[in-house]
Image: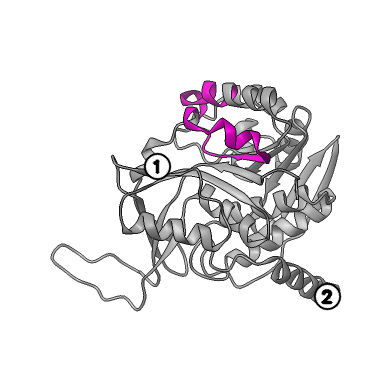
Amino acid sequence: MTGKKWDVFIYGDINVDIVIPGVEQFPGAGQEHVVEDMNVYPGGGAALFALGLGKLGLTPAFQGSVGADCHGVWLREELKRSHVDCTFLGTSQKNKTGISLSFTNEKDRSFLTYRGTNEEWNLEAIDIEGVKDAGHIHLTSYAGSRNHHQFKMLLKKIREISSATVSFDVGWDETGEWYEGIYELLPFMDILFMNETEALHYTRGLNATEAALEFSRQCNMAVIKLGKSGSIGAKNGVITKSRPYTVNAVDTTGAGDSFNAGFVYGFLKGETMEQCLRIANACGAMSVTAYGGNTAFPTKEELYHFIKQQDERQDD
């Protein structure tokens, strides 16, 4: 699609998600509870993004690290099955593959996470040759002042060596810092992704529309995810709003990453902001209809069939 060896180069986290549905309470000391189901799925925001693009027919390359264990072997196979190039996927001899246990019920989710090889995450490890051969770069895991300088140096380097476009999902700031220095990075971005709460924190209280406009004055376009309220995008001072698709949500794991994959897919196809948001909303909505962050993510044919059906239903 981009005329490069890889349409998109992704660097980031990858782990195994073990989802245990229907957990209403945890067993006490010395007790055992029997559950009706328990399944293993690919996890990690960057990996889910890459898997989504592969399912849509793009050629993504993923760089990250798994352990020298059965989970690492299985994740590598899952990536390849979705047409993700694993040339840059390393095998760590230091840590085991990360695992996240997800306890879900109809009201909430709880997690126990072992980060494993994701502890080795380091922007300086990005393979620059991979960046050179990609039409688009997707970055995640911004941690404010802790890795701001690394991001700044990497984004400058990308601009120096490549004509690739760049998308960036800042993610949740667990420290609560919401580092104002992020504005230094915006001029290097073609697409900035945030959810509504993140945007509120980084702008110190602006609503989603105001935040999108503020960000887009410094980057090419800003996209704000509004969950059940849809999404908005801002470019050249123009706000575009997109209504949500209504589905029966089972597991919201990976919904934001699925949204990102859909938007970048539309962007690389040269679609309008309106159509990119519709595709993104559809990918996000479809992803929550099954357990696991990528299980229900659509193929290209499934995506457009879903959009057509939903639009016809909304127009009735």
**Colour style of the rendered protein structure:** one colour
Residue 135 falls inside the magenta stretch? yes
Asked if the residue under mark 2 is in contact with the one under mark 1, i.e. CB atoms within 8 Å, the reply is no
N-terminal of the two: label 1 or label 2?
A: 1
Q: Which residue is mark 1?
A: 118
Is 21 drawn above or below residue 255 in the view shown?
Answer: below
Mark 2 lies on a secondary structure that is helix
In the rendering, which numbered label is found on residue 169?
A: none
Query: Mark 2 sits on what residue?
Result: 312
What is the magenta range?
Answer: 124-152
Residue 218 x, y percent position in the rendering = 75, 27
Separation of residues labelled 1 and 2 (CA atoms): 43 Å
Amino acid at circle 2 = Glu
- Residue 201 coordinates in the image, percent (x, y): 59, 35
* Whole-percent x, y for residue 311 in the image: 81, 70
Does the magenta run of residues contain 262? no
Q: Quadrant of the C terminus?
A: bottom right
